Amino acid sequence: MGSGTHPCEGFRELDPRTLCAPDAPALVRPGQRILSFLQCAAAAAGIARGLQRAGVHRGDLIALAIPNAEDLLLGFLGVSRIAAAAPLDCKLAEAELRSRLLLLKPGALLAPAEPDPKLVRAAYAAGTTLLSMRFPSDGDHPPEISLVHPGAAGRRVDAELAAVFQTSATTGVPKLAPLTRGNLDAMILNVQRSFGLRADDRLLCLMPLHHLSGLLMCLAQLMPEGMVICANAFDPGRFGEWLAAYRPTWYLAGPAIHRSILQVVKERPDGFRQTSLRFIRSGSAAIQPALVEALETSLRVPVIHGYGMTESGVITSTGIHRGAPGSVGKSIGVTVAIMAQDGSLLPPTAQGEIVLRGPAVMSGYLDDPAANQNAFHNGWFRTGDLGWLDPDGELFITGRIREIINRGGEKILPHEIDAVVAEHPAVAQAAAFAIPHPTLGEDIAAAIVLRPGAVAVESEIRNYLALRVGPASLPSRIFFVDEIPVTATGKPRRRELSHLFAGAAEDRPLPAGNSFPNDAAGDRLEQRIAGIWSRVLGISTPPPENESFFALGGDSLALAQMLAIMEAEMGVDARRLAAPGFLAAPTIAALRDAIVENQTSVKPSFARAGVDAVVLQERGKGPPFFCLPGATLDASYLRPLARLVGDAQPFVVLRDTSWDAAPDARAFEGLVQRFVDYIRDTQSRPLGPIGGHCFGGILAFECACRLEALGWPVPSVVLFDTAVPGYRKPLQQWMQHIKWAPQLALSLRRGTPRAEERTLLASMAEAAAAMMRGYVPRPFGGSVVNFMAAGQCVSSRVLQDARLGWDDFAKRGFKWYRVPGSHDSMFSEEYVAPLAHLLRGILLDSR
């Protein structure tokens, strides 16, 4: 069904016999495969059959630990056909994964074809059968289910269960919330009716699917046969590209991602004046009214938020039309009431505990009668949250009875952190608690009482924890105290600790004398890092050397942005900087030490006669692979490709350094000759392949032709999304890439370019475009390979796609491959892996 309304059917199997438009796109991963409803239905059915062959039956509980969002969604649909599915967070530390498996006692754990070693070890330690799931590349054949290692028999559950989620409920103690097909059906119907979802709607999901909130929204959109776009990793710079490419009618994200999107929109307002969005959904954590207003003003669509929990799905929603200020909206199908301490129901405006009932609410925790006795009263489920209802049914939340910490949507169990901290030999007592955070909403802190005579510092405790808990559970602040306030039964008073240290979390004065001096040279490594931090965090005062990045207002998205800028501007490996050592002590001092320690990862640069050679990878056998970038002086965008290609061959980027010379020195002839002279002066025969991106591909091809004519044959030319000059209509599209891509790439990596940078880039782009218009390729004696970005138009007819025209000039054959991403993003961390794998094979074959 391509448009219009579709009757809401709740949670149902994707049965080809009932599909209105089986060939319509259903599931999309940006830059990757697009699956139709028929392919999704076939995949889910294939997963179910494979599990049955592996011995899975109705009444079994199957855990899923699958990092790719679209694969997890298909896995859930397949497992829930014959068993109960329990999604897990793949980012958990090994000990946390083992703890989850011991609590679940699943009959099997379903993982990707090449599971993370920590997952394998956790399953083995928990005695859990481990199964792997491999998806075929074409999407037309069923996934393969294989046994990795056997384990003990798992628990048996009610045959009507469709899913089991772990939740902390009202006490902070892990519990299992079982959801029947009827529960899911009611949850989905509530969302569909409240949001008015139709078959012509498209959801861009920017939330993980191992939580019910993300999974539920995807199911609610799929069931009326609407499209779901799953982004595994959010990239602020590509948000506008996703909107343009897939035209979603709504997107789902948490507050931290909303803030990042808002920043992108503010930087490029013209690109977001007209969008396909009709509303925005915010979930996982409370969103501040100011952020709602800013999003609605910038994107010109309403922001829907509300109140929900794992045990019941979405409870209330503000709806398309804004309700009472400060409320979380009205019920969308769940009956909501306010209960007094004696169990009686309170009238409007009276404050008490929020309680629920209805078909969407689970009937009780799994195998936990004590928890059920506390959580249910006279058929009402007690949420543990405090609030009140106005006469119109608008719900207002005023506090929380629960102790769980909501760190930017990640639900953290404080008692698990307590247990790990208490294992440190210097610690006598410990209690984790929530503190305010400007972007995450809540952050984690820990109060510690040391043993008599013991000595410890904050960095030592954080280093200890970084190796034992996941990044989301790592406290940002450690407070040493003489005693921890406890209840009459000896439990920590976490709310009291939160209140006690809230001021310390919000008021972070810079220590006197700890900021960096403003020396004349201005080249100190610490100062460069501090400058980047100030830009990312939006602070005017230089941050102190030993202050935590997160304590200054940073979050995971800001961390990724900061590391990307450092990689682009300082030539360091961001993945090495994000190691546990820095996460344990996220300070400028620690980052400085990490950079110094990993200086070997910063490859040297060699210049000669107007050519700069940046060595991105120096190991390997044989001659180097020379690569010419597009119309930009920056080589760092090729670093992810070089890193993933590995040591198959040295990887060197050749850059021209004469762009600031007189105009006649920029001529195509001079450019090519400088590169040819450099290669002949520095290399011996035989040469290896030469490659280039966009305009750099044209230069690489001509260099190979000239070297061949001089008796220096090149085995092959590797092109990265390079068009053949002379195909006028499609060539105009590539001229636009030459003109704007360098500026966009530099903006994403370094922030808004300075005026002189914009002038230089514009000059480079115009010169490159002029050269391409006048260049006529000639036959080349070797082979040519062109990696064509899937995000651009691809046709089998040469006259329609200029990238295929190289077949006319390669005497030893022409090959082309479609690779994920667009012309500008194909080298990004998100998309580059398939490209690197193919390039590695080409380099090995060329020896």
Image (spheres, helix red, strand yellow):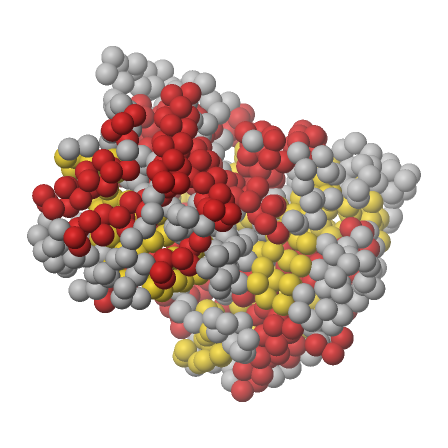
Measured as percent of width and height from the top left, residue 464 is found at: 34, 47
Task: Please say if 847 is above or below 491.
Answer: below
Residue at the (23%, 56%) spot, across then down: 689
Tell me where residue 439 sits by quadrant: top right
The answer to whether residue 541 is left or right of residue 75 is: left
Camera-side residue: 187 or 393?
Answer: 187
The answer to whether residue 497 is left or right of residue 774 is: right
Camera-side residue: 724 or 320?
Answer: 724
Measured as percent of width and height from the top left, residue 80 is found at: 64, 73
Camera-side residue: 120 or 44?
Answer: 44
Quarter of the image with the N terminus is bottom right
Q: Is residue 553 visible?
A: yes
Measured as percent of width and height from the top left, residue 686 is found at: 12, 58
Measured as percent of width and height from the top left, residue 125 is found at: 40, 70
Tell me where residue 15 sits by quadrant: bottom right
Residue at the (18%, 44%) spot, across then down: 676
Residue at the (45%, 40%) spot, across then down: 735
Q: Is residue 259 visible?
A: no
Task: Please say if 196 is above or below 158.
Answer: above
Residue at the (81%, 58%) spot, across then down: 4
Task: Please say if 172 is above or below 523.
Answer: below
